[in-house]
Image (spheres, helix red, strand yellow):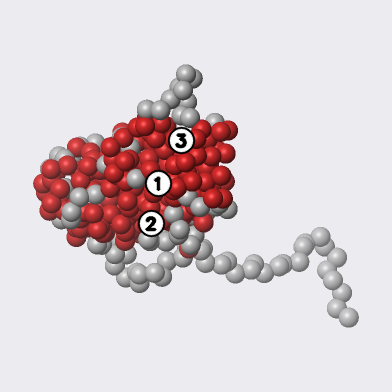
C-alpha cells in the first residue's frame, strides 16, 4: 500500500463546477413592465409573474382621480383600448372611463352603452385586478349617469351589468365582494327607484341563494327610497308578495331585508289610508284585512307577526 505523506499538507479537493445563475422572477417582471415582450407568447408567463403583475396594479379611489388634459382625445380611442388583449392597458382605460364619468361626462355620453358592454366583459375576467377595477368603474358610472341608466337604450344594457354585480357581490373574494356591494349601493342611490325595483324583482327567485340575498338588500333599500305615488303604482300587494317570499329564504340577510320591506310597506299603507288611533298606529283589523286579501293565510300571519313585533 502506498503510504500517505507524513507532512501536514491537506489533500487537494477539486472544486465543484459552479451552476449558472438562475434568472429571477423579478427580472422577468421588469422586462415585461418595460415593454420587452415582443417574443413572449401570450399566456406563457408563470403564475408568479402574473401574480406580481396584479400586485403592481394601483386601485385609485374616486376622490384621487384627476381630470384629463384632453378628454375628447381620450374618448376617441377609448373603445379600442378597452378591447385590448393586454389586461393592464384595459385597467388603464377603465381608469380613464372613471375620469370621464367624474369630470367630463359629456365626452362619454355617446359611448356609454358600448362602454358598459366592454365593462361587463372585463368584470367577467378571472383576473382579480381587472375585475375589481371594472367594478370600481361601474360605481363611478352609476354616480355620474344613474339618472339615464334605466332609460332606453341603456335599459337593456344595464341588465347584464346588474347581474354581474350581484354575482360578484356573492362570491368568496372579500375585496371583490365588498367593491360590488358598494357599486350596488351607488346604483340604488343614484337611479330612479321604481324602474330599478322592476329590474331587481326578477332576482328574488334566483337559483343562487347568495344572489337572492344581495338582491334582497338592494330591493329593501330601493323600497325605502320610494315615494308614496311610485309605491302605489308598483302596488302594496306586489311588494308584500316579494317580502313574503324572502321571509322563507335560507340566508338571514334575505330574511332581514324582508322585514325591512314589510316595515316600509306598513308605514306607507298607514300614511295612505289615514286611519290611525290615538297612539298613531294603524288599527289592527285594517292591516289584517289587507294582508289577508293580498297573501296566502300562512304568509299573511307571518307578515302580521312581524309588524306586531316592531
- In the displayed structure, 68 sits above or below 130; it is above
Label 3 near label 1: C-beta < 8 Å?
no
- From this viewpoint, which residue is outermost toward the right? 1
Q: Residues within 10 Å of mark 1 (few under 14, many from 20)?
A: some
**Residue 169 in sight:** no
- In the displayed structure, 11 sits above or below 177; it is below
Number of residue marks: 3
**Residue 118 in sight:** yes
Could you tell me which secondary element the residue under label 3 belongs to? helix
Q: Position of residue 306 (x, y in %)?
A: 55, 38
The residue tagged 1 is 237
Could you tell me which secondary element the residue under label 1 belongs to? helix
Q: Position of residue 131 (x, y in %)?
A: 38, 54
Q: Position of residue 236 (x, y in %)?
A: 38, 43
Point out the frontmost of discs 1 and 3: 3
Q: Residue at x 45, y 59 (%)?
A: 206
Pointer 2 or 1: first along the chain: 2
Q: Label 2 to label 3, Cα distance in Å?
A: 30 Å
Could you tell me which secondary element the residue under label 2 belongs to? helix
Point out the frontmost of discs 2 and 3: 3
Residue 163: quarter of image: bottom left
Label 3 near label 2: C-beta < 8 Å?
no
The residue tagged 2 is 202
Q: Residue at x 54, y 50 (%)?
A: 297
Point out the frontmost of discs 2 and 1: 1
Pointer 2 or 3: first along the chain: 2
Residue 227: quarter of image: top left
The residue tagged 3 is 286
Q: Label 2 to label 1, Cα distance in Å?
A: 16 Å
Q: Position of residue 166 (x, y in %)?
A: 41, 53
Amino acid at each position: 500500500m502506498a503510504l500517505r505523506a507524513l507532512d501536514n499538507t491537506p489533500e487537494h479537493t477539486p472544486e465543484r463546477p459552479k451552476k449558472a445563475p438562475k434568472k429571477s422572477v423579478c427580472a422577468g417582471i421588469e422586462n415585461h413592465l418595460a415593454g420587452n415582450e415582443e417574443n413572449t407568447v401570450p399566456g406563457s408567463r408563470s403564475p408568479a409573474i402574473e401574480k406580481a403583475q396584479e400586485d403592481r396594479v394601483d386601485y385609485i379611489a374616486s376622490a384621487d382621480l384627476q381630470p384629463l388634459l384632453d378628454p375628447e382625445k381620450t374618448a376617441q380611442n377609448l373603445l379600442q383600448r378597452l378591447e385590448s388583449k393586454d389586461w393592464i392597458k384595459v385597467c388603464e382605460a377603465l381608469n380613464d372611463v372613471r375620469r370621464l364619468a367624474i369630470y367630463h361626462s359629456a365626452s362619454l355620453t355617446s359611448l356609454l352603452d358600448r362602454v358598459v358592454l366592454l365593462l361587463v366583459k372585463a368584470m367577467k375576467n378571472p383576473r382579480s385586478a381587472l375585475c375589481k377595477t371594472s367594478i370600481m368603474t361601474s360605481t363611478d358610472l352609476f354616480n355620474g349617469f344613474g339618472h339615464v341608466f334605466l332609460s332606453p337604450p341603456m335599459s337593456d344594457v344595464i341588465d347584464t351589468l346588474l347581474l354581474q354585480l350581484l354575482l360578484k357581490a356573492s362570491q368568496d373574494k372579500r375585496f371583490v365582494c365588498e367593491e360590488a356591494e358598494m357599486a350596488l349601493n351607488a346604483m340604488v342611490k343614484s337611479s330612479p327607484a321604481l324602474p330599478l325595483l322592476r329590474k331587481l324583482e326578477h332576482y328574488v327567485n334566483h337559483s343562487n341563494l347568495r344572489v337572492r340575498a344581495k338582491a334582497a338588500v338592494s330591493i329593501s333599500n330601493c323600497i325605502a327610497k320610494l315615494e308614496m305615488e311610485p309605491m302605489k303604482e308598483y302596488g302594496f300587494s306586489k311588494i308584500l308578495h316579494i317580502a313574503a317570499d324572502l321571509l322563507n329564504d335560507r340566508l338571514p340577510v334575505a330574511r332581514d331585508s324582508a322585514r325591512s320591506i314589510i316595515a316600509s310597506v306598513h308605514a306607507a299603507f298607514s300614511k295612505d289610508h289615514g286611519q290611525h288611533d290615538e297612539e298613531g298606529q294603524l288599527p289592527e283589523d285594517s292591516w289584517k284585512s289587507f294582508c289577508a286579501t293580498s297573501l296566502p293565510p300562512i304568509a299573511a300571519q307571518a307578515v302580521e307577526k312581524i309588524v306586531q313585533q316592531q
